[in-house]
Image (tube, helix red, strand yellow):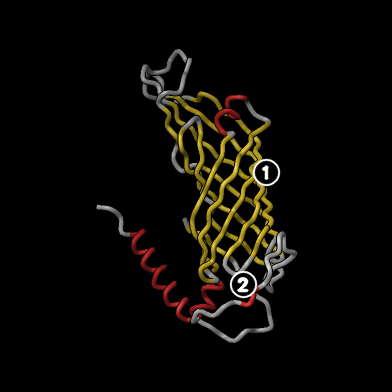
Amino acid sequence: MKSLKPYIIALGLFLILNHTYSQENHKIDSTSLKKITFFPKEYGDKKWKILLGLDARRSFFHGHKIKLAGLKIGAEYKGVHRFGLGFYWINKPLIIDDFPVTKLDAADSTHVRFKLGYSSFYYERVFIKTRYWEVSFPVHLGGGRIEATYLDSIGAYPLLYERPFSCLTLATQTKFYPIKWFYLKISGGYRQTFNTEVEVKKAFNRPFYSFGCGISISELYRAIFPKKEKATKTENPEMEIR
């Protein structure tokens, strides 16, 4: 029997979306009427904002599709500059059955397990920002490690190799905000590795893509419990769901 968790989450989001959208009463935000500015100097009335979110990605490794789990921690300045740390890893080892192994104790039906993880510093610059749409360019610079183990003749998995690497990723990201506190997101880019072996470069120099949705917790709170605007500014942390 399939898990009901995804359907329960989807139903809950639908009910909240329907409730808060009806509260807005189809009001037109004045910012949506402004002329679009490329690389705006600022957006919104908050100078600083804390950012915390999931950042799962899908990519390719040795010709196989992989899913990288990710976590981003950082800050946003004037609504258009974002920077911080990103952490990425694969939850389960990737198993490749046709990977060539020249070890003498390798099993006849050799397969290799790969583990991968890396961290990076990131900077993201907003290119276009309106009430409903946002386009930005994230850049990541960091490094990590790839570990490979192979199946031997007695059923154990000794180390085949362990390789550190550095990497640079360039991407384009688009968000759509149907309401202020909820957005849909899609992004794509390319990852280039360096300071490592040729075999790692061949395996990991690949395009990647991701998609998902996000929630601004403070905007959600204001939508459910509307209050009069206050003069003091509060931080607006964000949480992404995939």
User: Quadrant location of residue 78?
Assistant: bottom right
Crowd around label 2: few <14 · some 14–19 · many ≥20 (10 Å): few
Mark 2–mark 1 Cα distance, whole angstroms, equals 34 Å
* Image mark for residue 141: 1
What's the residue at 59%, 86% (across, down)?
A: 228
Q: Secondary structure at mark 2?
A: helix
Q: In the rendered image of this protein, does residue 181 appear above or below residue 226? A: above
| Residue at the outermost right position | 41
Q: In the rendered image of this protein, does residue 151 appear above or below residue 8? A: above
Tell me the kind of residue under disc 2.
Ser
Position of residue 146 measured from the top left corner of the image (x, y, whole percent): 55, 33
Crowd around label 1: few <14 · some 14–19 · many ≥20 (10 Å): some
What's the residue at 47%, 24% (across, down)?
A: 158
Position of residue 164 measured from the top left corner of the image (x, y, whole percent): 62, 32
User: Quadrant location of residue 175?
Assistant: bottom right
Tell me the kind of residue under disc 1.
Leu
- The residue to which callout 2 is attached is 32
Q: Secondary structure at mark 1?
A: strand
Q: Nearer the viewer, residue 177 or 95?
A: 177
